Image (cartoon, rainbow, N blue to C red):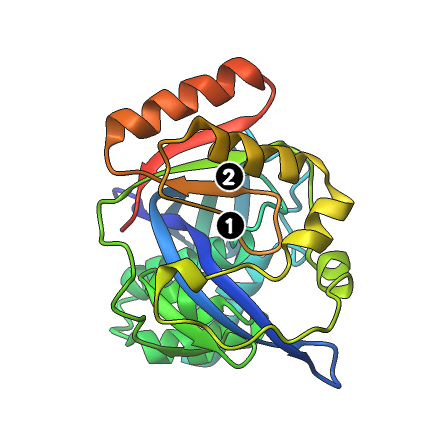
Amino acid sequence: MTPITETAYAKINLALHVRARLPDGYHEIETLFAFCADGDGIAIEAAEDLTLATSGPFSGGLPTDDDNLVLRAAKAMQAHFGVRAGARISLDKRLPIAAGLGGGSADAAAVARGLNRLWVLDATEDQLCTAIGPLGADMAACVASRAMLGTGVGDVLSPPPADMPVAGTPILLVNPLTPCPTGPVYQGWDCADRGSLAIARAGWRNDLTPGAVALVPEIGLALYLLDEIGTAHFVRMSGSGATCFALFDSAAMRDAARDEIAAQQPGWWTCASVLR
């Protein structure tokens, strides 16, 4: 049987406005989710038991037991839908770890979509979100993997504003390959509510950027270099870092920027993609 394949699309936050710190430690946010055409690769085959194997440039040290969100999502799917069958899951880890690209959640969501097909569940997106949603606040956005406005803790989704960049917009991802853990970045937020999400793109910000730069100064350098190239029309950090991104009017501009970044910082990771 040919394996079922899915792409765990890289998630970016075009904006991430932090509005309040909640008593349970989570944060009330307003964020604009978008997704790139590239990401980690998932392959799934029928099997008696649930197993996970990893490969790829960023697979080193990844657990293959219940500490991996992919396997936990698969078990949540089994339990929710009452499935007794197993699956052999392969994860090709192409995105950096702790990169602000929703990697773990995107992987788990892709596995849920793949198992939905393998086990012929015919589940809707809402049903998949019910099954694996408790595993992470951005799980619902990653199941859909399309542009969304996220509120609450990022789990309440609605259509995005009209100023969203269109599908096919060239995007360059840049990561200095220094992990930037989410918890400490959110803890570094200064608790200042800088206001609601603007309709116009010029007002979109990432309130976690100062705290992330304090932890990983290379993020500040990445943002500076992307701005300094001068051809991008929108530059931000994604999520809690360390990945930064830039949007361009053409693939040629994007690729030239990628080459310039690679020449200046040959040890950094870059990915030239487009928005879905």
- Determine whether, in the image, residue 214 is placed left or right of residue 244: right
Kindly identify the amino acid type of the residue bearing the numbered disc 2: Leu
Provide residue 47's location: percent of width, then percent of height. Answer: 42, 53
Q: Position of residue 157 (x, y in %)?
A: 39, 77
Circle on res. 95: 2
Please name the residue shown 26% across and 44% down the image: 169
Marks 2 & 1, CB-CB < 8 Å contact: yes
Left or right of 10? Residue 190 is: right
> What number is the disc on residue 101?
1
Judge by depth and name the residue closer to the eye, 66 or 154. Answer: 154
Image point (27%, 51%), residue name? 276
- Asked if residue 152 is positioned above or below residue 275 in the image, the reply reads below
Of all residues, the one furthest to the top in this rendering is 263
Residue 185, picture quadrant: bottom right
The earlier-in-sequence mark between 2 and 1 is 2
Q: Is residue 75 visible?
A: yes
**How many numbered dots are placed on residues in this image?**
2
- Helix, strand or loop at label 1? It is loop
Question: Which residue is at a point 70% across and 45% down the rendered structure image?
Answer: 213
Question: Outermost residue, bottom direction?
Answer: 23
Residue 85 appears in the rendering:
no
Please tell me which residue lies in front, 240 or 257: 257
Looking at the rendered structure, the secondary structure element under dot 2 is loop
Instruction: Name the kind of residue labelled 1 in the image.
Output: Leu
- The reply, left or right, for residue 224 in relation to residue 26 is left
Q: Is residue 218 above or below residue 202?
A: above
Rounded to the nearest angstrom, the CA distance separating label 2 from label 1 is 8 Å
Mark closer to the observer (2, 1): 1
Residue 104 coordinates in the image, percent (x, y): 55, 54
